[in-house]
């Protein structure tokens, strides 16, 4: 077969493009939703962080998860909680924000090593190839733990936080009197904060538009 593999590759590329567009659209929508309901989003994220900290503690006590890794996870979520003090605004040079970025990577690495070693030890202790190792988490359980206890809060913060503060109009940035149709409301709107996820999507779309313009591809409205 020669054509069917090519069809498979083409379908994979098209599916990846649709998946990327769906993720970008979801991030954009969630960022808009947080901007509309900031108070509710802050309350929800705070309770989510406390809930995950309690879940990690229960896993340590009941399922005998490693104590040190559990402490690291709870401490990481405590640091994530520090980003809520000025929600939804954050400075990219804020030590708490930088520490949060580092802790996400550290938690991913240490928990990945933990589950890998647990499965490796379980399979090494098997007496027969047909035996089923006991007390070994399945792929679904491991993926669920990573999704809820490692990635969920950082991802939610990435969608919710804004990289710039609201700037009120002042004497220094007031428009000149010669400008027509520009008022205080327009200045405030132009300085409106924007979520990091939304800003990322806008940057990517702008870059794609620039590349398309460079290659000579024009949008339908530009051809009129």
Image (spheres, rainbow, N blue to C red):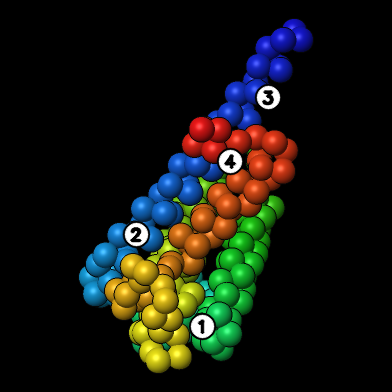
Q: Earlier in the sequence, mark 1 or mark 4?
A: 1
CA neighbours of label 2 inside 10 A, class few (<14), some (14 to 19), many (20+): some
Residue holding disc 2: 32
Q: Position of residue 161 (x, y in %)?
A: 42, 72
Residue holding disc 1: 91
Mark 3 vs 2: CB contact within 8 A: no
Write the residue at 43% across / 81% down.
Answer: 176
Residue holding disc 3: 9
In this rendered view, identify the residue nearer to me: 93 or 8. 93
Q: Nearer the viewer, mark 3 or mark 1?
A: 1
Query: Distance from label 3 to label 2 (Cα)?
Result: 35 Å
Q: Earlier in the sequence, mark 3 or mark 2?
A: 3
Q: Earlier in the sequence, mark 3 or mark 4?
A: 3
Q: Secondary structure at mark 3?
A: helix
Q: Position of residue 64 (x, y in %)?
A: 45, 71
Determine the image quadrant of residue 186: bottom left
Q: Is residue 98 above or below residue 107?
A: below
Q: Position of residue 45 (x, y in %)?
A: 32, 72
Write the residue at 65% across / 23% down.
Answer: 10
């Amino acid at each position: 077969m020669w054509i069917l593999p090519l069809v498979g590759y083409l379908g994979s590329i098209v599916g990846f493009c649709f998946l990327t567009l769906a993720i970008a659209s979801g991030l954009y929508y969630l960022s808009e939703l947080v901007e509309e309901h900031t108070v509710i989003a802050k309350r929800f994220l705070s309770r989510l962080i406390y809930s995950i900290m309690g879940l990690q503690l229960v896993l340590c006590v009941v399922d005998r998860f490693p104590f040190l890794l559990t402490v690291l996870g709870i401490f990481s979520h405590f640091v994530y909680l520090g980003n809520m003090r000025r929600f939804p605004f954050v400075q990219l040079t804020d030590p708490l924000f930088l520490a949060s970025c580092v802790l996400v990577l550290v938690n991913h690495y240490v928990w990945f090593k933990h589950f890998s070693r647990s499965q490796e030890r379980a399979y090494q202790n098997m007496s027969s190839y047909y035996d089923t190792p006991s007390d070994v988490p399945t792929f679904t359980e491991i993926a669920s733990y990573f999704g809820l206890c490692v990635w969920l809060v950082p991802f939610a913060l990435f969608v919710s936080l804004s990289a710039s503060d609201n700037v009120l109009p002042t004497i220094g940035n007031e428009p000149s009197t010669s400008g027509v149709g520009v008022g205080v409301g327009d200045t405030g709107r132009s300085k409106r904060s924007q979520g990091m996820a939304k800003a990322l999507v806008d940057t990517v779309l702008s870059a794609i538009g620039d590349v398309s313009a460079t290659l000579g591809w024009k949008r339908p409205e530009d051809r009129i």
